[in-house]
Image (cartoon, rainbow, N blue to C red):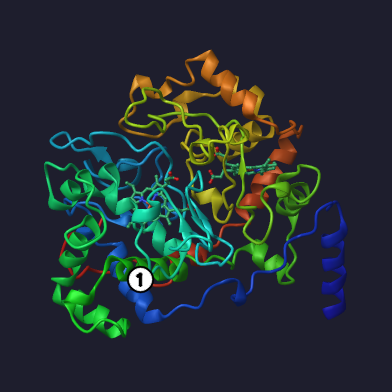
């Protein structure tokens, strides 16, 4: 039996592959996890206490029912009601501005190789900085994070349209508006005091962190460290059929054909490389831009120039981070602005980005609050020209059967255990606020 299996394996690993397959994922790729810390983070992740108006939790946009994202093109945070594609703008409290990018999935972010966050990588590990990080906050950034993932968590709570809400409505948003972020009375401190005032949280923080003797010692870095450990533990994903294959089981049928294309002539693994199908780098792939775009307060446009906004380097125009493809069949809509709602169509368009920009079908967008202006970029030949010009990817021609095989391979990256999560959704959270 053993010999037969080895023979099959040899056939799989040599036929058609011009790039080698990644090694199987092992425990040492991940930082160790303290389970009590993860359990504390689980409660915080689902608790709307971290939002200014106590209405939005991390899970409002990163929910296990939607593969740790939210199932819509562009998220609605503060000012929204409901979950996933049913989420609607609250007519009595509409958001002041909309969120410009698609909520990414959170799989494997506890793996040590994930040191760059966000679609444009604006948060990055950098040992040469005093805080160990490069971020939009720079000098104002707090220190004491256990990981980049923990530092990431400091941002959504400050964003008016994600979690903070309007300065007219609550103390946290007012502090943000007045530029009071760190330090006593700053936005992070106000949120920490809220959490510390809940006796169940105070007791749990004391039990988990040796440096915490009483509620006054709870800082936002403790909150964010717990959240990070929870995400790392909950959504580690390395038990998909593809992982089983890397550990010795055969992958058969179209998924195997697709794998051979992916790691061979289709060239996908040039960028989607390594154990998690990402090089963690930035590439302009001409993915359609919909929604409000990313602009500064004084600007008036709907563009999102991606990595260029971080580096100012024209080689980075319209470049976005290569996403990991773990569970990708479940994480739609796809693309940094969620413009695609069909995975096969995404792959077809991705093979020839420039040609596909012109034929993009906008009727597919899933976002309840869409406005005509959200297609401003796609309606402007100059804007489309600029996105197309940035693309350096040579078109790859595949037939429909080959595209279907690639999609079958992408489905072999679906990992039911990770989609369910290890701790799951808590029955209730210590603040007593409703779950999303
Ligand atoms: C209103 C929706 C919304 C809420 C609420 C929200 N997020 Fe996000 N999250 C997003 C969007 C959109 C992005 C991508 C932003 C970008 O790249 O510019 C993101 C990015 C992230 C990332 C980066 C992932 C990566 O691979 O780059 C992490 C981690 C994350 N969120 C965790 C959290 C945590 C923890 C919370 C709660 C404290 C939270 N989010 C609350 C929408 C949301
Ligand atoms: C030159 C680098 C590069 C190559 C080659 C490449 N990709 Fe991508 N891929 C990216 C980048 C960058 C993105 C994100 C683009 C964006 O959102 O603007 C992406 C996005 C994706 C997504 C959407 C993921 C999500 O969560 O939204 C899928 C699926 C995907 N690629 C599959 C493939 C497949 C299959 C191939 C081979 C046929 C391939 N890619 C080839 C760089 C590449």
Q: Residues within 10 Å of mark 1 (few under 14, many from 20)?
A: many
Q: Quadrant of residue 4?
A: bottom right
Based on the displayed image, in which of its 4 quarters is residue 426 positioned? bottom left
Determine the residue positioned at 22% across, 68% down.
428
Residue 60 visible in the picture = no
Residue 404 in the image: above or below residue 377 = below
- Residue 5, x across and y down, in percent: 82, 73
Residue 432 percent coordinates (x, y)? 15, 66
- 399 or 146: nearer the viewer: 146
The reply to whether the residue tagged 1 has its Cβ within 8 angstroms of ligand 1 is no
Q: Is residue 355 above or below residue 395?
A: above
- Quadrant location of the C terminus? bottom left
Q: Residue at x 34, y 52 (%)?
A: 155
Q: Is residue 282 visible?
A: yes
Q: For the image shown, how many numbered marks are present on the structure?
A: 1
Residue found 48% across the figure and 33% down from its top = 339
Q: Picture coordinates of residue 194 (x, y %)?
A: 16, 65
| Left or right position of 4 against 368 | right
Q: Nearer the viewer, residue 165 or 299?
A: 299
Looking at the image, which residue is at 44% across and 62% down? 149
User: Which residue is tagged 1?
Assistant: 226
The picture places residue 192, in percent across and down from the top left corner, at 21, 65
Residue 46 drawn above or below residue 157: below
Quadrant in which the N terminus is drawn? bottom right
* SS at circle 1: helix
């Amino acid at each position: 039996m053993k010999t037969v299996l080895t023979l099959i394996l040899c056939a799989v690993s040599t036929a058609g592959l011009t790039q080698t397959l990644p090694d199987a994922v092992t425990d040492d790729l991940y930082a160790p996890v303290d389970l009590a810390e993860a359990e504390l983070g689980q409660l915080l992740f689902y608790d709307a206490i971290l939002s200014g108006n106590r209405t939005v939790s991390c899970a409002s946009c990163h929910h296990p029912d939607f593969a740790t994202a939210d199932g819509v093109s562009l998220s609605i945070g503060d000012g929204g009601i409901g979950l996933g594609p049913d989420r609607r703008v609250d007519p009595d409290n509409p958001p002041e501005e909309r969120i410009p990018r698609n909520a990414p999935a959170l799989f494997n972010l506890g793996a040590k190789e994930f040191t760059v966050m966000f679609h444009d990588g604006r948060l990055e590990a950098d040992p040469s900085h005093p805080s160990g990080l490069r971020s939009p906050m720079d000098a104002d950034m707090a220190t004491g994070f256990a990981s980049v993932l923990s530092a990431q968590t400091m941002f959504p709570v400050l964003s008016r349209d994600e979690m903070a809400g309007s300065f007219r409505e609550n103390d946290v948003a007012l502090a943000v508006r007045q530029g009071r972020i760190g330090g006593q009375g700053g936005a992070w401190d106000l949120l920490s005091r809220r959490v510390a005032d809940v006796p169940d949280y105070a007791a749990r923080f004391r039990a988990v962190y040796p440096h915490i003797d009483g509620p006054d010692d709870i800082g936002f870095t403790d909150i964010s460290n717990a959240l990070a450990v929870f995400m790392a533990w909950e959504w580690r994903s390395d038990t998909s059929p593809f992982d089983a294959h890397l550990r010795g089981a055969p992958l058969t049928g179209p998924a195997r054909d697709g794998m051979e294309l992916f790691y061979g002539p289709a060239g996908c693994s040039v960028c989607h490389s390594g154990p998690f199908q990402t090089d963690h780098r930035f590439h302009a792939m001409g993915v359609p831009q919909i929604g409000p775009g990313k602009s500064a307060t004084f600007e008036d446009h709907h563009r999102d120039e991606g990595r260029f906004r971080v580096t100012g380097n024209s080689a980075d125009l319209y470049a976005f981070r290569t996403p990991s493809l773990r569970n990708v069949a479940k994480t739609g809509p796809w693309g940094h602005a969620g413009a695609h709602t069909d995975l096969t169509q995404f792959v077809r368009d991705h093979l020839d980005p420039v040609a596909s920009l012109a034929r993009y079908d906008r009727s597919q967008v899933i976002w309840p609050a869409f406005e005509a202006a959200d297609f401003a970029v796609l309606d402007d030949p100059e804007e489309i020209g600029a996105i197309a010009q940035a693309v350096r990817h040579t078109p790859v021609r595949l037939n429909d059967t080959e595209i279907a095989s690639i999609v079958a391979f992408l489905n072999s990256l679906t990992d039911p255990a990770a989609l369910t999560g290890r701790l799951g959704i808590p029955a209730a959270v210590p603040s007593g606020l409703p779950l999303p």
